[in-house]
Image (cartoon, helix red, strand yellow):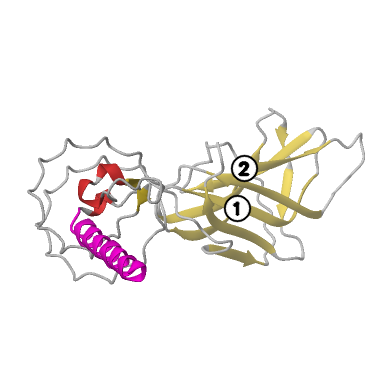
Amino acid sequence: MMRSRVNMTTMLFVLILSLMAAFCSAKNNKQSDTKPVSSCPSCNNGGQTGMWTYMTCVPGAPGAPGRDGAKGELGSPGKTGTQGPRGADGKKGAKGEPGIQGSAGQKGERGDKGDSVTPRLASHTNWKECAWKKADGKDSGLIYNCDFLKKYPDTSLHVYYAGNFRVHGCDDCCSRWYFTFNGAECSSPGTIDGALYLYTLGQKLSPQHHRHIEGHCNNIQKGKVRVGFWVGKCVTGHKLSDAYTGWHSLSRIFVEEVPKAQQ
């Protein structure tokens, strides 16, 4: 009889536990925390608090995901961020196609006239030498003419005489040999000449030897220029001597066209 009561009690206890498990599985998953049995009326253990004070509800299976909620309102714009560092240079692109040719520009104004330029002449580009072997005993007059073709208007002529001449037969006398250009002596920068003075002190002297007269002349027009070599009286006022030009040797006149000298 006693065993029959115990079995019924055990079966009743198992039934109560089954009902409690079914009830707790239907609860919301948020109520899975441990609670006193008194907070779950259906899980009351018939007043036997001493035996089962707390019960743990077993969580049920997760439910299906709910639908998406409604779209929220547009938020306010954010602040402008700081500028980032400069990026690396990109690769050089391919050459583009030629563009359309532009229209012709307007004709420019005529410029001012430029200054004339003296041509650059290389050494001995235009030169001439006249030579002769003839003694000339005249005391005054033309010794020789050397004709020259000058190519440019803004150049100079470089000339020299090389040969023998002397004075003789007088005391305190002077003779002068000089160049002319188309019949006139040079005025720029000055005359090209050489004077020979003789003072014998009673002796008969005849100083016959080689001499040289050289210089440059400016402001001569281009074209034919007659370069003359003359002998005559000195500008000092001394009496004219017995002159002699070209004694047993060649005499020569050299003429060369050169750029003007620096100012």
Front position in the image: 90 or 177: 90
Residue drawn 63% across and 66% down? 131
Q: Tell me if residue 123 is in the magenta stretch.
A: no
Horizontal arrangement in the rendering, residue 70 relative to residue 9 (left or right): left
Residue 49 appears in view? yes
In the rendered image, the vertical position of residue 66 relative to residue 115, given as above or below: below
Please report contact status of discs 1 and 2: CB closer than 8 Å, yes or no. yes
Badge 1 is on which residue?
159
Residue 142 appears in view? no
How far across and how far down the image is residue 233, in percent? 65, 37
Front position in the image: 106 or 215: 106
Front position in the image: 97 or 90: 90
Badge 2 is on which residue?
192
Q: Kindly state the secondary structure of the residue where label 1 is placed.
A: strand
Q: Looking at the picture, which amino acid does disc 1 mark?
A: Val
Quick one: which residue is furthest to the top in this view? 237
Q: Could you give the CA–CA distance between mark 1 and mark 2, rounded to whole angstroms?
A: 9 Å
